[in-house]
Image (tube, rainbow, N blue to C red):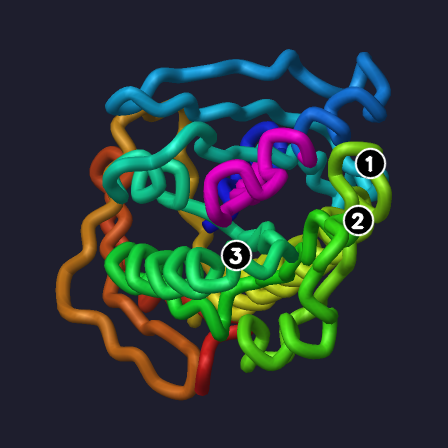
């Protein structure tokens, strides 16, 4: 889930490009990176994970703030032929949304289904439900001579009716649309979370008002030895806490009952 830094008022979101090997994940990320303002993005980094390359970089989206928090989006994918699920499990950890890059070639349809099944399993193992996670499908390689129709791809891969976008990643056609859509979904979730947190903080906030049930007229006369002692148990009733208190100033000792009004507390 998104990482919030309340001290710096920043929030970091993670998006993962997932799909069959060679289906356009790396090409899509490369196109996105090239067309971002150089001042708003980091360099693409590569990490070797069990013989596979994990690529990632971060950038500031067009909607750069949400509820006063600066936003940073991190894009991840795993490329090459993935022999086991471990690299993907690492990439998907803490993800806020997934773009499934499907290959439109007829011979890759079973692999699309296999990778989609694997994705569901990996997300479930990490505690996610793909049906409740921001998710879009990128139908790539629409320029393939025998590309499967969008209607058929929708029927076979998109039973949850997630947003779907036709793309040709090699020329960048349509590549930004799925990312923009998913980012908006994630920012909406972030906004909801911040609003919920603000409401919880407001509900939990308690203001204190102090009063004495009788006026205190202690004359210190320069005496520095002042002691306050709670001499019994407090009584909480209708949002007011009543506590017996003894104040000693030098040789003068007076008993009071301190009443604390809990403003905003449940009554």
Residue shown at the point (45%, 82%) measured from the top left: 266
Q: Which residue is mark 2?
A: 143
Give whichever of 21, 46 is nearer the camera: 21
> Residue 104 at x, y = what percent?
65, 57
Mark pair 3, 2: CA separation:
15 Å
**Label 1 neighbour load within 10 Å: few <14, some 14-19, many 20+:** some
Going from N to C along the chain, the mark reached first, 1 or 3, is 3
Tags 2 and 1 touching, CB below 8 Å: no
Q: Is residue 137 above or below residue 176?
A: below
Q: Secondary structure at mark 2?
A: loop
Q: Which residue is mark 1?
A: 172
Residue shown at the point (34%, 36%) measured from the top left: 82
Q: Secondary structure at mark 3?
A: helix
Q: Secondary structure at mark 1?
A: loop
Mark pair 2, 1: CA separation:
12 Å
Residue 258 vs residue 96: left or right? left
**Label 3 neighbour load within 10 Å: few <14, some 14-19, many 20+:** few
Q: Quadrant of the C terminus?
A: bottom left
Which residues are the magenta region? 12-28
Residue 224 vs residue 75: left or right? left
Q: Is residue 159 above or below residue 39?
A: below
> Residue 256 at x, y = what percent?
31, 63
**Label 2 neighbour load within 10 Å: few <14, some 14-19, many 20+:** some
Tags 3 and 2 touching, CB below 8 Å: no
Checking the image for residue 107, the label placed there is 3
Going from N to C along the chain, the mark reached first, 3 or 2, is 3
Residue shown at the point (73%, 24%) measured from the top left: 33
């Amino acid at each position: 889930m998104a990482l919030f830094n309340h001290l710096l008022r920043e929030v970091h979101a993670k998006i993962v490009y997932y799909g069959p090997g060679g289906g356009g994940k790396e090409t899509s990320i490369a196109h996105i990176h090239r067309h971002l303002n150089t001042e708003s993005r980091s360099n693409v980094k590569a990490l070797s994970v069990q013989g596979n390359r994990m690529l990632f970089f971060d950038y500031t989206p067009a909607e750069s703030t949400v509820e006063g928090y600066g936003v940073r989006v991190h894009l991840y994918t795993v490329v090459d032929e993935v022999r086991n699920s471990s690299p993907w499990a690492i990439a998907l950890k803490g993800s806020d949304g997934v773009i499934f890059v499907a290959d439109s070639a007829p011979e890759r349809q079973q692999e699309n289904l296999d990778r989609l099944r694997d994705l569901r399993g990996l997300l479930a193992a990490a505690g996610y439900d793909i049906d409740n996670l921001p998710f879009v499908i990128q139908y790539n390689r629409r320029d393939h001579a025998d590309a499967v129709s969008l209607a058929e791809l929708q029927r076979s891969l998109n039973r949850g009716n997630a947003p779907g976008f036709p793309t040709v990643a090699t020329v960048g056609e349509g590549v930004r649309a799925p990312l923009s859509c998913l980012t908006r979904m994630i920012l909406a979730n972030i906004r909801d979370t911040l609003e919920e947190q603000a409401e919880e903080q407001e509900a939990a906030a308690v203001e204190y008002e102090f009063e004495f049930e009788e006026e205190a007229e202690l004359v210190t006369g320069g005496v520095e030895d002042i002691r306050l002692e709670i001499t019994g148990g407090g009584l909480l009733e209708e949002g007011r806490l009543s506590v017996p208190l003894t104040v000693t100033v030098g040789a003068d000792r007076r008993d009071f009952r301190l009443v604390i009004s809990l403003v905003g507390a449940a009554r």
